[in-house]
Amino acid sequence: MYNISPKSLIVGKELIYLPTCHSTNLTAHDYLSKSSNEGLVIITANQTAGKGQRGNNWESEPGSNLTFSIILYPSFLEVRNQFYLSKIISLAIIDVLTTKLGEKIKIKWPNDIYFDDKKLGGILIENILTGHKLKASIIGIGLNVNQTEFSYQQATSIINLYNKITSLPELLTEVLESIDKWYSLLSNNNYDLISTQYESRLLGRNIVRKFKTDRYFEGMIIGVNEQGQLKIKVENETLNFDFKEVEYLHET
Protein backbone atom coordinates (compact mmCIF):
# COMPACT_ATOMS: atom_id res chain seq x y z
CA MET A 1 0.00 0.00 0.00
CA TYR A 2 2.83 2.41 0.84
CA ASN A 3 5.33 1.65 -1.91
CA ILE A 4 6.78 5.16 -1.83
CA SER A 5 10.21 6.62 -2.50
CA PRO A 6 10.49 10.02 -0.81
CA LYS A 7 13.25 12.30 -2.04
CA SER A 8 14.91 12.54 1.33
CA LEU A 9 18.32 11.98 2.87
CA ILE A 10 17.20 10.26 6.06
CA VAL A 11 13.48 10.28 6.79
CA GLY A 12 11.47 7.55 5.06
CA LYS A 13 14.31 5.71 3.34
CA GLU A 14 12.98 2.58 5.06
CA LEU A 15 9.28 1.98 5.72
CA ILE A 16 7.39 -0.80 7.49
CA TYR A 17 3.66 -1.08 6.85
CA LEU A 18 1.44 -2.89 9.35
CA PRO A 19 -2.25 -3.40 8.43
CA THR A 20 -3.09 -3.26 12.15
CA CYS A 21 -1.10 -2.48 15.26
CA HIS A 22 -1.78 -1.32 18.79
CA SER A 23 0.47 1.75 18.61
CA THR A 24 3.10 2.75 16.07
CA ASN A 25 5.09 4.46 18.82
CA LEU A 26 5.17 1.29 20.91
CA THR A 27 6.09 -0.73 17.84
CA ALA A 28 8.86 1.79 17.10
CA HIS A 29 10.25 1.13 20.60
CA ASP A 30 10.57 -2.55 19.66
CA TYR A 31 12.52 -1.68 16.51
CA LEU A 32 14.63 0.82 18.42
CA SER A 33 15.92 -1.97 20.63
CA LYS A 34 17.11 -3.75 17.46
CA SER A 35 19.29 -0.77 16.43
CA SER A 36 17.14 0.23 13.48
CA ASN A 37 18.23 2.68 10.78
CA GLU A 38 17.63 6.37 11.38
CA GLY A 39 14.57 7.64 9.58
CA LEU A 40 12.67 4.33 9.77
CA VAL A 41 8.92 4.89 9.37
CA ILE A 42 6.34 2.55 10.86
CA ILE A 43 2.84 3.13 9.52
CA THR A 44 -0.47 1.38 10.05
CA ALA A 45 -3.95 1.52 8.55
CA ASN A 46 -5.56 0.65 11.87
CA GLN A 47 -4.07 1.79 15.16
CA THR A 48 -6.08 0.23 17.96
CA ALA A 49 -4.49 1.95 20.95
CA GLY A 50 -3.13 5.22 19.67
CA LYS A 51 -2.17 7.80 22.25
CA GLY A 52 -1.92 11.56 22.15
CA GLN A 53 -0.14 13.90 24.54
CA ARG A 54 -0.23 12.93 28.23
CA GLY A 55 -2.24 9.76 27.63
CA ASN A 56 -5.10 11.23 25.62
CA ASN A 57 -6.66 8.80 23.14
CA TRP A 58 -6.20 9.39 19.41
CA GLU A 59 -9.34 8.65 17.38
CA SER A 60 -8.74 7.39 13.84
CA GLU A 61 -11.01 5.56 11.41
CA PRO A 62 -9.16 2.55 9.90
CA GLY A 63 -7.79 3.19 6.42
CA SER A 64 -8.83 6.84 6.30
CA ASN A 65 -5.97 8.72 7.93
CA LEU A 66 -2.21 8.80 8.41
CA THR A 67 -0.94 7.22 11.63
CA PHE A 68 2.78 6.61 11.72
CA SER A 69 5.98 6.93 13.73
CA ILE A 70 9.53 7.87 12.79
CA ILE A 71 12.74 6.85 14.54
CA LEU A 72 15.43 9.52 14.68
CA TYR A 73 18.85 9.72 16.36
CA PRO A 74 19.38 13.45 17.03
CA SER A 75 22.58 12.96 19.03
CA PHE A 76 23.62 16.48 18.00
CA LEU A 77 20.77 17.93 20.07
CA GLU A 78 21.27 18.84 23.72
CA VAL A 79 18.53 17.95 26.18
CA ARG A 80 17.86 21.63 26.88
CA ASN A 81 17.04 22.09 23.18
CA GLN A 82 14.79 19.06 22.77
CA PHE A 83 11.68 21.18 22.14
CA TYR A 84 13.19 22.08 18.77
CA LEU A 85 12.13 18.62 17.60
CA SER A 86 8.52 19.56 18.30
CA LYS A 87 9.05 22.79 16.41
CA ILE A 88 10.46 21.23 13.24
CA ILE A 89 7.93 18.38 13.06
CA SER A 90 5.08 20.87 13.47
CA LEU A 91 6.55 23.17 10.84
CA ALA A 92 7.09 20.31 8.40
CA ILE A 93 3.44 19.31 8.58
CA ILE A 94 2.28 22.93 8.45
CA ASP A 95 4.28 23.51 5.26
CA VAL A 96 2.58 20.60 3.50
CA LEU A 97 -0.95 21.36 4.66
CA THR A 98 -0.68 25.08 3.94
CA THR A 99 -0.23 24.29 0.23
CA LYS A 100 -3.56 22.48 0.34
CA LEU A 101 -5.60 24.45 2.86
CA GLY A 102 -4.07 27.92 3.04
CA GLU A 103 -2.78 30.14 5.80
CA LYS A 104 -5.45 29.18 8.34
CA ILE A 105 -3.36 26.11 9.18
CA LYS A 106 -1.69 26.83 12.53
CA ILE A 107 0.21 25.15 15.34
CA LYS A 108 -1.67 24.95 18.60
CA TRP A 109 1.08 24.90 21.18
CA PRO A 110 2.90 22.71 21.77
CA ASN A 111 2.42 20.63 18.61
CA ASP A 112 -1.19 20.08 17.54
CA ILE A 113 -2.17 21.03 13.99
CA TYR A 114 -5.28 23.18 13.69
CA PHE A 115 -7.42 24.83 11.04
CA ASP A 116 -9.10 27.75 12.79
CA ASP A 117 -10.36 26.12 16.01
CA LYS A 118 -10.57 22.59 14.58
CA LYS A 119 -7.93 19.93 15.18
CA LEU A 120 -6.41 18.28 12.10
CA GLY A 121 -3.52 16.39 13.62
CA GLY A 122 -1.36 15.66 16.60
CA ILE A 123 2.25 14.81 17.38
CA LEU A 124 3.62 12.70 20.22
CA ILE A 125 7.40 12.78 20.70
CA GLU A 126 9.21 10.41 23.05
CA ASN A 127 12.87 11.19 23.67
CA ILE A 128 15.50 8.87 25.06
CA LEU A 129 18.32 10.75 26.77
CA THR A 130 21.95 9.99 27.48
CA GLY A 131 23.77 12.53 29.62
CA HIS A 132 23.13 16.02 28.22
CA LYS A 133 22.28 14.77 24.71
CA LEU A 134 19.39 13.05 22.99
CA LYS A 135 20.12 9.43 22.15
CA ALA A 136 16.98 8.66 20.16
CA SER A 137 13.52 10.05 19.43
CA ILE A 138 10.30 8.41 18.38
CA ILE A 139 8.03 10.81 16.55
CA GLY A 140 4.38 9.72 16.48
CA ILE A 141 2.13 11.56 14.02
CA GLY A 142 -1.60 11.35 13.39
CA LEU A 143 -3.28 13.34 10.61
CA ASN A 144 -7.00 13.37 9.89
CA VAL A 145 -7.26 12.98 6.13
CA ASN A 146 -10.29 11.21 4.65
CA GLN A 147 -12.39 10.66 7.77
CA THR A 148 -15.60 12.70 7.73
CA GLU A 149 -17.12 12.16 11.17
CA PHE A 150 -15.56 12.46 14.62
CA SER A 151 -16.83 12.00 18.16
CA TYR A 152 -14.62 14.90 19.25
CA GLN A 153 -16.45 18.13 18.38
CA GLN A 154 -13.27 20.12 17.72
CA ALA A 155 -11.83 17.60 15.23
CA THR A 156 -11.85 17.97 11.45
CA SER A 157 -10.06 16.50 8.44
CA ILE A 158 -8.62 17.45 5.09
CA ILE A 159 -11.63 16.04 3.25
CA ASN A 160 -14.00 18.13 5.37
CA LEU A 161 -12.02 21.25 4.48
CA TYR A 162 -10.75 20.42 0.99
CA ASN A 163 -13.88 18.54 -0.19
CA LYS A 164 -11.94 15.83 -2.02
CA ILE A 165 -10.25 12.55 -1.18
CA THR A 166 -6.50 12.81 -0.62
CA SER A 167 -4.06 10.06 -1.62
CA LEU A 168 -2.53 8.80 1.63
CA PRO A 169 0.73 7.60 0.01
CA GLU A 170 1.20 10.92 -1.78
CA LEU A 171 0.51 12.92 1.37
CA LEU A 172 2.85 10.72 3.40
CA THR A 173 5.60 11.24 0.83
CA GLU A 174 5.21 15.02 1.03
CA VAL A 175 5.23 14.99 4.84
CA LEU A 176 8.34 12.79 5.06
CA GLU A 177 10.21 14.97 2.58
CA SER A 178 9.25 18.07 4.54
CA ILE A 179 10.35 16.53 7.85
CA ASP A 180 13.64 15.54 6.25
CA LYS A 181 14.22 19.14 5.13
CA TRP A 182 13.49 20.62 8.56
CA TYR A 183 15.52 17.92 10.32
CA SER A 184 18.49 18.88 8.17
CA LEU A 185 18.02 22.53 9.15
CA LEU A 186 17.97 21.53 12.82
CA SER A 187 21.10 19.40 12.50
CA ASN A 188 22.83 22.46 11.02
CA ASN A 189 21.92 24.59 14.05
CA ASN A 190 19.36 26.86 12.36
CA TYR A 191 17.73 27.57 15.73
CA ASP A 192 16.77 31.19 15.08
CA LEU A 193 15.08 30.38 11.76
CA ILE A 194 13.18 27.48 13.32
CA SER A 195 12.01 29.53 16.30
CA THR A 196 10.94 32.46 14.15
CA GLN A 197 8.95 30.26 11.79
CA TYR A 198 7.39 28.27 14.63
CA GLU A 199 6.25 31.34 16.53
CA SER A 200 4.89 32.96 13.37
CA ARG A 201 2.56 29.97 12.90
CA LEU A 202 1.25 29.74 16.47
CA LEU A 203 -2.51 29.62 16.80
CA GLY A 204 -3.77 32.76 18.52
CA ARG A 205 -0.45 34.59 18.49
CA ASN A 206 -0.82 38.33 19.18
CA ILE A 207 -4.57 37.94 19.57
CA VAL A 208 -6.35 38.51 22.88
CA ARG A 209 -8.06 35.25 23.78
CA LYS A 210 -9.57 33.55 26.82
CA PHE A 211 -7.57 31.01 28.83
CA LYS A 212 -8.14 28.87 31.88
CA THR A 213 -5.83 27.74 34.66
CA ASP A 214 -7.28 27.66 38.16
CA ARG A 215 -9.12 30.76 36.97
CA TYR A 216 -10.33 32.32 33.75
CA PHE A 217 -8.35 35.16 32.25
CA GLU A 218 -7.70 37.00 29.00
CA GLY A 219 -4.25 37.17 27.51
CA MET A 220 -2.24 37.16 24.32
CA ILE A 221 0.18 34.45 23.20
CA ILE A 222 3.47 36.12 22.32
CA GLY A 223 5.74 33.12 21.81
CA VAL A 224 7.57 30.21 23.42
CA ASN A 225 10.61 30.40 25.70
CA GLU A 226 13.79 28.30 25.48
CA GLN A 227 12.28 25.60 27.68
CA GLY A 228 9.29 25.22 25.37
CA GLN A 229 6.89 26.97 27.74
CA LEU A 230 4.07 29.06 26.30
CA LYS A 231 4.46 32.80 26.91
CA ILE A 232 1.19 34.65 27.46
CA LYS A 233 1.06 38.39 28.05
CA VAL A 234 -1.52 39.30 30.67
CA GLU A 235 -1.86 43.06 31.04
CA ASN A 236 1.74 44.21 31.67
CA GLU A 237 3.09 40.82 32.76
CA THR A 238 4.37 37.84 30.78
CA LEU A 239 3.45 34.44 32.24
CA ASN A 240 5.09 31.13 31.27
CA PHE A 241 3.11 27.89 31.19
CA ASP A 242 4.02 24.23 30.85
CA PHE A 243 1.82 21.86 28.86
CA LYS A 244 -1.49 21.13 30.64
CA GLU A 245 -1.01 24.10 32.97
CA VAL A 246 -3.18 26.32 30.80
CA GLU A 247 -6.24 25.59 28.69
CA TYR A 248 -6.86 27.47 25.44
CA LEU A 249 -10.59 28.16 25.34
CA HIS A 250 -12.26 27.80 21.95
CA GLU A 251 -14.33 30.62 20.55
CA THR A 252 -18.07 29.95 20.46
Image (cartoon, rainbow, N blue to C red):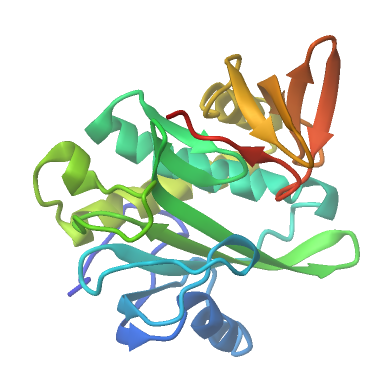
Q: Position of residue 81 (x, y in %)?
A: 78, 46
Q: Position of residue 13 (x, y in %)?
A: 38, 66
| Quadrant into which the C terminus falls | top left
Residue 190 appears in view = no
Placement of 4 over or under 94, stated as above or below:
below
Identify the residue shown where x is 46% and y is 72%.
Answer: 40
| Quadrant into which the N terminus falls | bottom left
Identify the residue shown where x is 66% and y is 32%.
Answer: 211
Question: Relative to residue 37, is residue 55 drawn left or right?
Answer: right
Placement of 132 over or under 200, stated as above or below:
below
Q: Quadrant of residue 134?
A: bottom right
Q: Position of residue 152 (x, y in %)?
A: 38, 56
Q: Position of residue 236 (x, y in %)?
A: 84, 9
- Residue 131 vs residue 201, the one in the foreground: 201
Question: Relative to residue 50, is residue 210 drawn left or right?
Answer: right
Identify the residue shown where x is 52% and y is 71%.
Answer: 51
- Residue 101 vs residue 39, the one in the foreground: 101
Placement of 48 over or under 165, stated as above or below:
below
Question: Relative to residue 46, is residue 127 drawn left or right?
Answer: right
Residue 27 appears in view = yes
Residue with the most extreme left position: 164
